[in-house]
Image: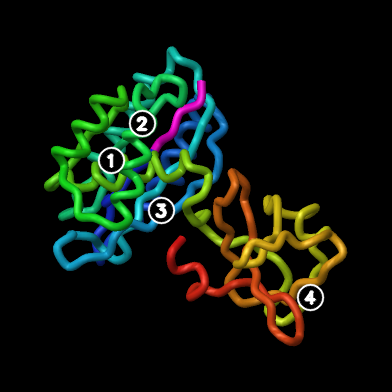
Amino acid sequence: MKIYVAIDDTDSLEVGATGQSANELRRIIKEMGWGEPEPVTRHQLLLHPDIPYTSHNSSMCFIVEMKEDKLNEFIDCAAEFLKETSAPGSDPGLCVAVNDRIKDMNNLMSFGFKAKVEILNKEEAYKIAEDCGIHLSEHGGTGQGIIGALAGIALRMTGNDGRFQGRTKLKDAGETMGIGEIIANTEIEEVQSIDGHVLTDDEILIIGDKIKTVLLDGKRKLLVYRENDGWHTCNNQHLKNY
């Protein structure tokens, strides 16, 4: 069965990173033989002075195919992992959702979209999780991270939100690559301009400094923009909303 796993607020300004924690959970799943997790996506939530967050208020989510009889064991393991490894002063939350058991997908999606534009609270998150049949738990501090964890699940499920954690290695900055070469040699499934144009295999791309990919149309895509000298990979400013 396909399960979605999301965590939030496991770090502090001095210690840790939630992306690292998510990848450590993926490593544990592989070591235990529970499945082969997909890459982690980072989901940007509302930035507001009334919302406590470490640096960017983003949650981390990944997908894994797992046998049903391993689900509860994994949840217990993930809960213990967050309790033991989260940074002092953090407010970690864990969300685990079985794709085909969600009872109210519309309600879940609505929560995810609201988390990008509204201030939400733990009571709302717990109510949505209960109504949808989703595991949601807090593992230290105020437990405020459950809000982002639940939102991360919803946003990953849309197939149209999130930046893949980590960088994709292409050629050095300033060098060029053909689109066909990029798709053949990386996990990138499609190269698309920020206004929606999908590039063909024979088009050429000028490589930038930091290569980040995003989740769009259910695919791992590399976003690009056009200048007079050709197509360029997008920078952090272009991707700030992902």
In the image, what residue type sits under mark 1? Leu
Percent position (x, y) of residue 15?
A: 28, 61
Residue located beneath label 3 in the image: 43
Q: Which mark is residue 176?
A: 4
- Callout 2 amino acid: Val
The mark lying in front, picked from 2 and 3, is 3
Where residue 25 sits, quadrant-wise, is top left
Extreme-right residue of the structure:
202
Earlier residue among tags 4 and 1:
1
Q: Earlier in the sequence, mark 2 or mark 4?
A: 2
Determine the secondary structure under disc 4. strand
CA distance separating discs 4 and 1: 42 Å
Residue on which disc 2 sits? 96
Residue 90 tag number: none
The residue range painted magenta reads 1-5
Can you give x and y, in whole percent of width and height, for residue 221 in the image?
63, 55
The residue labelled by disc 1 is 82
Q: Position of residue 58 (x, y in %)?
A: 35, 56
Measured along the vertical axis of the image, is residue 4 above or below residue 70? below
Amino acid residing under circle 3: His
